[in-house]
Image (cartoon, helix red, strand yellow):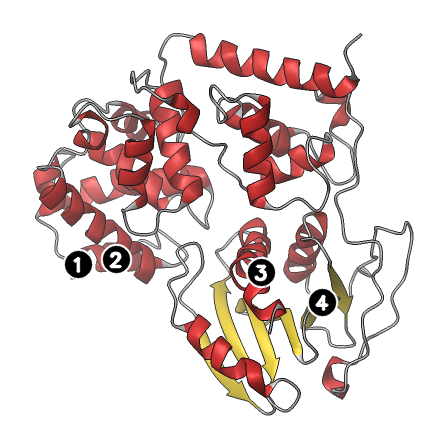
């Protein structure tokens, strides 16, 4: 008799296979007919698909995918030659004036550089990314990965969309991994496919073991479960087709939420309430509602060993781990018109880590805003700022990205 876990896997992959086998239809990227028509016409206007992909970061997906359509109306039409006629200042001006993206300077640069890359590397025809040389999935993933601002999530998602939605006959689909984002991580942990403290790589490896022929096949199915039904309060469970078999594993903060004491009075811990061992109460009204939502979202997806330390301040929350060196912490800070995600080092308590933080600040962070490094009092701070247009979910995920990219290096110092 199959176990509930085996039944869950069978249901997921049956639905994924059904989606994969269906005939090609219009993908509602934006739900704007004119825009979706161009995005789906990858034979004549493949640059729309590629540029939309690169914009699909840190803002609502519908809005991101519509950016190429808005640009096309500004540059004289959908043909690639019209996009190519724009210089970087032209594109920056449109991004800024029309508020196309929360990080308009960075994304305008990515947009311009992607156009130039299509021009120089793919002969003005973006479909050559998946056509030239009869490439397999791995080669296509690698080609997408070389575009500005594209990482594992976007490159695998792009290749998956080509195979699943556009029926491009790429070989070696076993190279398409699942695209790990907050929704995928949440569902994998909630339904028990991975431990609640699993890393992104563990999720990728688990998907490979479950369905080695095509690890990313269930990507969209799992993402939709996370978006539509898998809520922190379990309120959507009754609508989910996995409800009968799902163990509904808790996916909030680590059980031990009592932080080490800190020498700074500014960050002195306030009293912390407990309900369940894995649930930290964020008192309603303590923070601005937007900031409170970010903390609650992060609480749902806290990395292994980390916990939120609710401080006496109404404008910040400290993120700690038991194995971080003394004098090192992560923070969310509310600046009213913007919110920052930060890595901090106390210069008197951890002077040996200051060169590491300086070196980290000079790296490329493709899934984060450009960093700033500030010395303030006894603290050196690596800061990533997000303005009020950025969705709380994206800011919460950005803390996870920062931790994933810096934690192992800092922890071993």
Q: Is the N terminus in the top left, top right, bottom left or bottom right quadrant?
A: top right
Query: Can you tell which of label 4 and label 1 is closer to the viewer?
Result: 4
The reply to whether callout 1 and callout 2 are in contact (CB within 8 Å) is yes
Which class describes the residues within 10 Å of circle 1: few (<14), some (14-19), or many (20+)? Answer: some
| Residue 88, numbered label | 1
Q: Residue at x 73, y 85 (%)?
A: 266
Q: Which of the two labelled residues, at mark 3 and mark 2, occupies the earlier sequence position?
A: 2
Which label is found at residue 323? 4
Relative image position of residue 322 (x, y in whole percent): 75, 66
Residue 312: name its quadrant: bottom right
Give above or below for 183 relative to 165. below
Disc nearest the viewer among 3 and 2? 3
Q: CA distance from mark 3 to mark 2?
A: 26 Å
The percent position of residue 17, horizontal first and vertical second, equals 51, 12
Q: For this view, does 182 lie left or right of residue 275? A: left
Note whether residue 198 is visible: yes
**The label number, if any, that marks residue 403 in the structure image:** 3
Q: CA distance from mark 2 to mark 4?
A: 38 Å
Which residue was labeled with disc 2? 109
Give SS at disc 4: loop
Front label number (3 vs 1): 3
**Sooner in the amino-acid sequence: mark 1 or mark 2:** 1
Of the numbered discs 2 and 4, the one sitting upstream in the chain is 2
Q: How dense is the environment of label 4, judged by Cα within 10 Å: few (below 14), some, or many (20 and up)?
A: few
Secondary structure of residue under mark 1: helix
Earlier along the polypeptide chain: callout 3 or callout 4?
4
Q: Earlier in the sequence, mark 3 or mark 1?
A: 1
- How far apart are the two marked residues, 3 and 4, measured between alpha carbons? 13 Å
- Estimate the x, y position of residue 173 in percent, counting from the top left: 39, 22
Secondary element at image label 3: helix
């Amino acid at each position: 008799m199959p176990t509930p876990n085996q039944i869950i896997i069978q249901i997921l992959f049956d639905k994924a296979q059904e989606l994969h086998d269906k005939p090609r239809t219009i993908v509602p990227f934006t739900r704007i007919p004119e825009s979706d028509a161009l995005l789906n016409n990858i034979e004549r206007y493949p640059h729309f698909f590629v540029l939309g992909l690169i914009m699909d970061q840190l803002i609502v997906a519908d809005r991101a995918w519509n950016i190429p359509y808005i640009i096309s109306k500004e540059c004289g039409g959908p043909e690639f030659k019209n996009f190519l006629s724009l210089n970087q200042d032209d594109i920056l001006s449109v991004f800024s004036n029309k508020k196309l993206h929360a990080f308009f300077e960075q994304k305008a640069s990515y947009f311009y550089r992607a156009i130039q890359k299509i021009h120089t590397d793919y002969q003005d025809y973006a479909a050559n990314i998946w056509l030239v040389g009869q490439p397999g999935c791995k080669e296509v993933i690698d080609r997408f990965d070389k575009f500005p601002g594209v990482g594992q999530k976007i490159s695998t998602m792009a290749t998956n969309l080509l195979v699943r939605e556009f029926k491009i006959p790429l070989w070696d689909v076993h190279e398409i991994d699942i695209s790990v984002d907050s929704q995928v991580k949440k569902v994998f942990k909630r339904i028990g496919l991975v431990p609640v403290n699993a890393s992104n790589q563990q999720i990728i490896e688990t998907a490979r073991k479950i369905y080695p022929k095509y690890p990313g096949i269930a990507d969209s199915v799992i993402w939709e479960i996370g978006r539509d039904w898998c809520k922190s309060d379990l309120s959507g469970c009754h609508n989910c087709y996995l409800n009968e078999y799902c163990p509904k594993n808790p996916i909030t903060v680590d059980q031990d939420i009592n932080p080490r004491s800190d020498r700074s009075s500014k960050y002195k811990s306030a009293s912390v309430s407990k309900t369940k061992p894995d649930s930290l109460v964020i008192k309603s009204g303590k923070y601005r509602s937007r900031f409170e939502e970010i903390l609650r979202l992060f609480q749902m997806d806290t990395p292994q060993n980390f916990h939120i330390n609710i401080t006496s301040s109404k404008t910040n929350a400290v993120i700690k781990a038991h194995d971080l060196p003394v004098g090192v912490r992560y923070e969310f800070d509310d600046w009213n018109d913007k919110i920052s995600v930060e890595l901090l080092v106390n210069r008197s308590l951890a002077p040996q880590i200051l060169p590491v933080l300086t070196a980290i600040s000079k790296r490329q962070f493709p899934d984060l805003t450009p960093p700033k490094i500030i010395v303030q009092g006894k603290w050196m701070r690596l800061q990533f700022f997000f303005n009020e247009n950025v969705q709380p979910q994206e800011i919460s995920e950005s803390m996870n990205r920062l931790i994933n990219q810096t934690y192992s290096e800092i922890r071993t110092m």
